[in-house]
Amino acid sequence: MFRSILVPIDLAHKSSWEFAIPQARELAAASGGNVTLMTVVRDTRSMFEGIYFPLQLEGMFTTARDKLVSIAAEHGLERAGGEHEVRFGSIAGEILSLAREVDCDLIVMESHRPEMRDYLIGPNAAHVARHATCSVLVLRKAG
């Protein structure tokens, strides 16, 4: 059913992957698909100043990639042939861009951090759900 599943995560918030990765793995296993993990590095200071230092960017990318690989290994995605992608820029824009590039069938993401007590989905999940050219599963943890 789903041959390519994309799971965007926020490396700073475990809540963005602790429920989404297992769900994506289950869906991929049921249909013989694969899971791609991705994260987006946002350097707010650089965006405001309009300057990017190559060594700083390289360091941020390396740190993010190492953490992404570690998370993938914790969830058994290394053995399942999962891919990992680190991007720089707008969160929703980069999710949609990668989804098109890898021709994914499904994007699985959590709606927001559990600290938010409202019934709205987060702005990135809402943007992705509105503009994706594939199915989007926005997960919300009960309770």
Image (cartoon, rainbow, N blue to C red):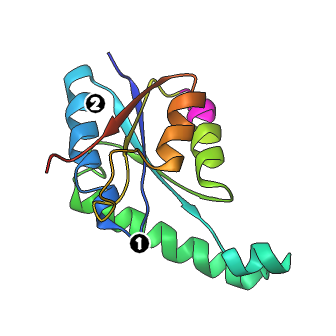
Magenta segment's dominant SS is helix
Please name whichever residue, 38 or 19, is drawn nearer the observer in this view of the structure: 19
Q: Quadrant of the N terminus?
A: top left
Figure quadrant of residue 109: top left
The residue to which callout 2 is attached is 28
Q: Residues within 10 Å of mark 1 (few under 14, many from 20)?
A: few
Q: Is residue 35 left or right of residue 57?
A: left
Where does residue 139 sit, x and y in percent of width and height?
29, 40
Q: Residue at x 56, y 35 (%)?
A: 99
Query: What segment is highlighted magenta in the picture?
Result: 99-103
Say whether disc 1 or disc 2 marks the residue closer to the N-terminus. 1
Where does residue 6 sit, x and y in percent of width and height?
44, 39
Q: Looking at the image, which residue sits at the far left? A: 143
The residue to which callout 1 is attached is 12
Q: Is residue 12 left or right of residue 115?
A: right
Please name whichever residue, 87 or 90, is drawn nearer the observer in this view of the structure: 90
Does the magenta-highlighted stretch encompass residue 4? no
Which amino acid type is marked by label 2? Ala
